[in-house]
Image (spheres, rainbow, N blue to C red):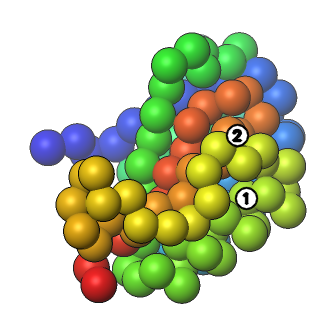
Amino acid sequence: MIDHLGIRVGDYAASRRFYDAALAPLGAGPVMEGPGEAGIRATGYGRAGKPAFWISEGGANAAGTHIAFAAADRASVDAFYAAALAAGGRDNGAPGLRPQYHPNYYAAFVLDPDGINVEAVCHTP
């Protein structure tokens, strides 16, 4: 249903470092860069040359924002969490099962430099 999603960030360089590190264990990385709307800096992250998640400078809009990225396996969730924390993210829920969602819901949560709740989730056992 969603083709791509974009967020504005308060500190473009810090957010770029964070998302470069946090998304790498999930098999995603920068696939497009350049001026976005209104000529502001923007980076599109994705796989196989198709950007699906964008960050752009211009001020944070974090209040209440939650983004969940799919992980291929539980080890990728663990690696996401470690990489995100090492890149300046703040813990918002260590890797583990969340059976309140379903029995195999394995996820980790971190807050990005702007306080956005970023999740990696694996739905398989």
Judged left or right of residue 12, residue 67 is left
Q: Residue furthest left?
A: 1
Residue beneath label 2, please?
112
Q: Position of residue 17 (x, y in %)?
A: 81, 53
Which numbered tag is attached to residue 35? none
At x 70%, y 40%, the residue is: 112
At x 28%, y 51%, the residue is: 100
At x 25%, y 45%, the residue is: 3
Q: On the rendered image, what quadrant is the N terminus found in?
A: top left
Q: On the rendered image, what quadrant is the C terminus found in?
A: bottom left
Judged left or right of residue 113, residue 27 is left
Q: Is residue 74 above or below residue 13?
A: below
Dot 2 crowding, Cα within 10 Å, few <14, some 14–19, many 20+: many
Judged left or right of residue 48, residue 62 is right
Q: Secondary structure at mark 2?
A: loop
Q: How many marks?
A: 2
Residue 90 occupies which quadrant of the picture? top right
Query: What kind of residue is marked 2?
Result: Asp
Residue 8 occupies which quadrant of the picture? top right
Is residue 115 among what the camera can see? yes
Instruction: Measure how far apart labels 2 and 1 are at the Cα level.
Output: 8 Å
Q: Position of residue 110 (x, y in %)?
A: 65, 48
Q: Relative to the observer, which residue lies in front, 101 or 48?
A: 101
Q: Relative to the observer, which residue lies in front, 23 or 107?
A: 107
Q: Position of residue 46 (x, y in %)?
A: 46, 61
Residue beneath label 1, please?
84
Q: Is residue 7 above or below residue 14?
A: above
Dot 1 crowding, Cα within 10 Å, few <14, some 14–19, many 20+: many
Mark 2 in CB contact with mark 1 (< 8 angstroms): yes
Q: Secondary structure at mark 1?
A: helix
Query: What kind of residue is marked 1?
Result: Ala
Choose the circle earlier in sequence order: 2 or 1: 1
